[in-house]
Structures are given as structure tokens and as C-alpha cells.
Amino acid sequence: MDITITQRPDPSPPATEPAGGRMVVNCAAYDRSGQRLPQISLDQISDVLALPDTFVWVGVHEPDEALLAKLQEEFDLHDLAVEDAHHAHQRPKIEAYGDSLFIVLHTAQEVKCNLEFGETHIFMGRRYLLTVRHGASLSYQPARLRSEREPEMLALGPSYALYAVVDYIVDNFLPITQAFREELEELEEAIFHQEFDRRTIQRLYELKKELVTLRLAIAPMQDILNQLMRLHPGLVRDEVRVFFRDVFDHATRVKEACDTMSEMLSAAMSVNLAMVSMGQNEVVKKLAGWAGIIAFPTLIASIYGMNFEKMPELSWAFGYPLALGAMFGLSALLYWRLRKSGWL
């Protein structure tokens, strides 16, 4: 059965961001075969949901209160979930509100060579999927386009669209962990250089902090995926659960990589401090060695500098040459011994 959506003008002005483009990134409807229907506006969402065998997929970015209120009206969203989606700064979690799910996921994105974190709040019902992005987060348009190229899978409804979004979020963590691994290898090489570089230990600390934050973003996702694999039978199709299992495996890989690199970073920081201490010990050993070498001439010169009446140089022509030779000989002997023992 063909479903036709009649376009009608949207009386409300388009929602826009002051400096970030449109808040409504996409608003699309799909029939039961997974084919995309004609473009719809926010006011038409309730009309589309009134039709049989259709679902709506909406994506917004940092919406204001007016837009969230409009979406709450169209999708009949729970007040507490909408409040969380507006304020952001939520921990990763999954909550059930009647016949809908509210999911919070943390995202990561490299911005100007710095790692920044954001949040994605997901509302999923039997006939809709709504994603609300905050902060550093890539657009989910690639996930949407990939799903639309597989209409037989998109025909599974909002649960498959949810899989596409969650899989896209987890996959974006993989290149970040790979970049961390490459940078860690470079820092490990810099640790064993002869010269101490304060920037190396500073970057090790920053990388450690970013890894901890990344782990806090990915670790709770495993519990969320566990629930999507086993619970909520009225919302998650059985055919989609195997896809969430694959995402769970990817999330486990990212978490294990974070744990491994975190341990390696701790070891690298300890090795760096040990190398600094060893360098300081080497300097102290050299200073002590040269002080010992200088001690012989100082001792002899100090004795000969006293005002005794009977001195070797007063009654013996070779007194001074002998004293100088003793200074040089003893100093050379001590230098050879220290050199042989590795102090110099």
C-alpha cells in the first residue's frame, strides 16, 4: 500500500541556531518497506504517526526549549526525559518511560587536534526515533544514509535505526583509540632520549586524562547494549538484537584498548620519572668524582700553603716539581679508577 504525505505549510518559523546552523538536522518518515516518504515538517509528525506501518526519524542539534516542547508535543515524550535532554551533562544511561526508551550516550570528536566530548540523547518509541546532540558530536547523517541504502533492514523500524546510530557512535571511538596508540608509541620513544623534555611528561598526563574520560564514556555503554540485547521486547525487534551484540563487541574492544593504554601510560610515566632520577644520579656521581679528583691537589696545595719554616721547597730544589707531580699523578690515578667504574 502506497502512503502519500500531503505537504502543508509550517506556520511556525524554522528553528535556527545563532552560530551553529539549523537545530533540526533532519526529519524523515519511512513506510513499512523501509522506503523514505516525502519530506515532512515537525507539525506533520503526528499526522504521519497516525498512518499505519510508518515511523519517523528526527535528528536535532542543541535544541532550545521551544523546539523540545514542540517535539514533546508531537511524540508525547516524558517530562523528565525532556528535561534531561535540555540540560545535558547527563551520565550514560538507559531509562524506560512507558512504551518508550530514553538513552544517554557520550560521544567524542577530535576538534583542532584536541579531543572533545559531547552527548547524544535518544528517544525511541514503537514508531519513532529522536536523537538530540549536544557538544562535540558528528552528524548521524552517514548512519541514516547507510540505513536508507538497506530498506529491507530499515523496515525493521526504529530499533534498527537506533542500532545504526549507536554503531556509528562506537565506531567513531575506534580511530580515536588508534590515534592514542600511535601517540603513545611516539611518547615512549621520547622518554628514552638523553635529554629531559618537560612537554613529554605533560603530554603523558594529558593523554592519561583523556583516556580516563574516554573510558568513562564507553564503559557504561556495555550495560546499555546488554539491555538492548536482552530486554524491552516491545521496543527492540528480535531481529535487531544480533546487531547490538556486534556493537557490544566493538565497545568491549574500545574499553579494553583504553584499559591497556591506561596501564601503559602509567608505566610510561613511572619510567619517565625513573629516567629523570637516574639522570640526576649520574650528574651527582660525576660531581662527586670530580670533587674527589680535585681533593688531592687541594690537600697538597693547602699543606704547602702553610707558613712552616722547614718546607721541601726551601731546602730541596725539586720540592715544587715533586709536589706538582704528586698532584697530577694522584688525580690521574683517581680519574682512571672512576672512569673504569663508570662514575665518569
Image (cartoon, grey):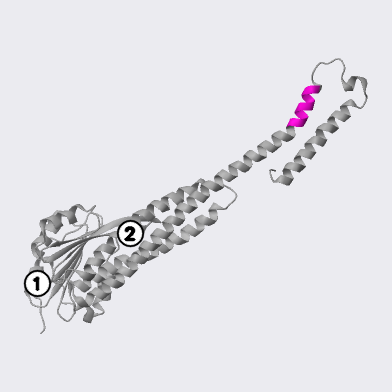
- Dominant secondary structure of the residues highlighted in magenta in the image: helix
Task: Decide whether residue 287 is among the magenta residues.
Answer: no
Question: Does 278 sit above or below residue 86?
Answer: above
Question: Does 123 sit above or below residue 335?
Answer: below
**Residue 141, located in which quarter of the rendered image?**
bottom left
Residue at the (21%, 78%) spot, across then down: 239
Residue at the (57%, 53%) spot, across then down: 192
Q: Is residue 306 left or right of residue 242?
A: right
Report if residue 153 is visible in the image: yes
**Dot 1: element:** helix
Q: Which residue is mark 2?
A: 108
Sequence-earlier tag: 1 or 2: 1
**Picture quarter with the C terminus:** top right
Residue 302 vs residue 23, the one in the foreground: 302
Residue 97 image position (x, y, % from top left) = 12, 62
Q: Is residue 218 left or right of residue 58?
A: right
Question: Which portion, as a residue range, is magenta?
Answer: 295-303
Q: Is residue 79 left or right of residue 194?
A: left
Q: Amino acid at mark 1?
A: Leu
Report if residue 200 is visible in the image: no
Q: Amino acid at mark 2?
A: Ala
Residue at the (23%, 74%) spot, across then down: 241
Question: Does 317 sit above or below residue 243?
Answer: above
Q: Which residue is mark 1?
A: 49
Residue 261 image position (x, y, % from top left) = 43, 58
Residue at the (27%, 67%) spot, across then down: 166
Residue 40 vs residue 167, the one in the foreground: 167
